[in-house]
Image (cartoon, helix red, strand yellow):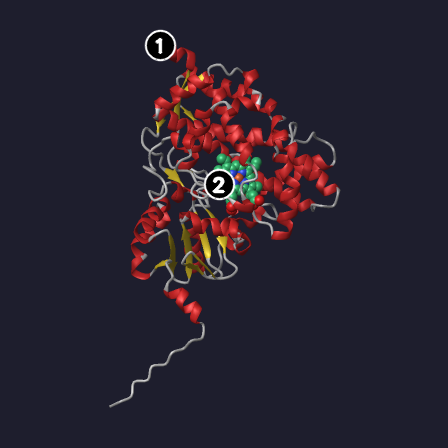
Amino acid sequence: MKNNIIIFDFSNMSDRISNYMNKTVTVKNFKILPYLWGITYNPLNTFSKLIKKYGNVLQLKVGKDSVYVVNDPDVIKHILKTNQDNYPRGKSVDDLADLFGNGLLNSDEAIWQVERKALTPAFHNSQLEQFYQVFFEEARSFTTILKNYESEQKPINLEYHFKLLLMRITFRNLFSPDFNYDIPKIYDSLSLILHHTTFKESNYRLFKSIILKKKIKLFSNDRNRAALQIISETAEKLFEQAYNGEIKTGGMLTILVKSVREGITEKSTAVDELKNVIFAGSDTVANGLLWLFYFLDKNQQYLEKIVEEIKDIDDVKLADQSALRATPVVQSALKETLRLVPPVWSFYRTSLETENINGYVIPKGAFIMISPFLLHRSEKFWNNPLVFRPERFMTNEEVEQFNYIPFGQGKHICIGNRLAQIEIQLLAIYLLKRFNFEFVSPTEGLPVLKPELIIASKTKVKVRVENRTRKELTSM
Ligand code: HEM
């Protein structure tokens, strides 16, 4: 009888056990095929389906490329906080590196640390109070736009107008009150760039790269490069004029000029920081405001509570931050909006070393996607997740630090987090006191979204505006 010799190889035993016990599911080959179309054209729904079917930590593998989708709060906590140094942004921002440069969204650790420390005071509470005058001036001129639409009985594209409004506020408050800029042109450039950040556009570029056998990047396209040029020239001109004392400076630009003068920040980095905030600081907020109004229109019981809550807050009271703290319904409705539609629907990390996190193995070099959108809509962590129910944030019974992350977590947590919430609350109170916003489209349910890097509406948002007092009188 032939001797059967069994060889036990004990080398790398712990690695093997850990891989054997690995709870991370890999979806590849014939299993991933049915989802490829969906990942390209409808990633939000498709990722949701994949997670439902395969679990909360999975590796999606197409050819040599793969992405680890992580949707488990404990694993997210480990990546974003507990061992955050093992998970830098890495290659995730490659495509936008020409736009982000050395700004906070892309810089190496050493530069990031210096810059984050230097810029943090620009977003302190004490600074925010100085922003109120601009808020009111801009809000007041915005009511003129709304009145025109109302008198012409024409629906307004609220997404577009909110984005312009927020861009004007960001420029005036953070950069300069008297810089001469062309907001619609900057808006168009940013929109074009953002449009090319969808999975669909990225996959087209990948496909083209394979056919043409050369790397096609976001800014290989002439129109995108021209758009980038407009944003870069605006930021350069802004910084130059501020540095030469030709314009007054707002909070963030004041700090940048000082930091460059003191030799802490390079001039080019200061320009990059401005570009980062042009990118990250207004569309995000406009989105939050837009969908807050949408959910309130579709859930009138909360709108009524808010109208009651804010009825005694006049502009004088509103100019004091304590007024915002005294509006729990507005606050919780905003939080619930950012749960259902987090403007930054996903962000990415790359792992430096292999780790086993609660049984999930994430290997060295893994490209990791964390999606507030998927997490916030998971039935595992929220009751009836698709229902708009601000009460969850009043009692906080369902809310944990790592199942609710609209602003991220850990050291890269959004630097404009507080500013964004104040901007949305202020504008919401100011505008809802004066107008009623009826969404003609989308008409019902959850809005259908276009997952650019910052989420946008898939279809044009049309809203009928009506003076609130007139509306209330006619409905009596
Ligand atoms: C509702 C509005 C906003 C949302 C939902 C949002 C969301 C986020 C998220 C999720 C991150 C973390 C990304 C990551 O971890 O990779 C982030 C980072 C960042 N955000 Fe925001 N943001 C908003 C408003 C703003 C505003 C108003 C500004 C500035 C004026 C801003 C500037 C930035 C910057 C510079 C970073 C990078 C921070 C760092 O890496 O140190 N954001 N934001």
Q: Which of marks 1 and 2 is in front?
A: 1
Residue tagged 2: 192
Q: Between residue 289 and residue 278, name the one nearer to us.
A: 289
Query: In the current view of this chain or complex, which residue is farthest to the bottom?
Result: 1
Q: How far apart are marks 1 and 2 (CA)?
A: 42 Å
Amino acid type of the residue tagged 1 in the rendering: Thr
Indicate the position of residue 332 as horizontal and vertical percent values. Answer: 43, 29
Please report whichever mark, 1 or 2, sits nearer to the chain's N-terminal start: 2
Residue sitting at x 36%, y 34%: 447
Query: In the current view of this chain or complex, which residue is farthest to the left?
Result: 1
Residue sitting at x 61%, y 35%: 123
Quadrant of the snapshot with the C terminus: top left
Q: Is residue 247 visible?
A: yes
Residue sitting at x 46%, y 58%: 366
Q: Can residue 217 be seen in this view?
A: no
Q: Is residue 98 above or below residue 239?
A: below
Local secondary structure at mark 2: helix
Quadrant of the snapshot with the N terminus: bottom left
Local secondary structure at mark 1: helix
Indicate the position of residue 104 as horizontal and vertical percent values. Answer: 59, 45
Residue tagged 1: 474
Amino acid type of the residue tagged 2 in the rendering: Leu
Q: In this view, does 28 lie above or below 380?
A: below
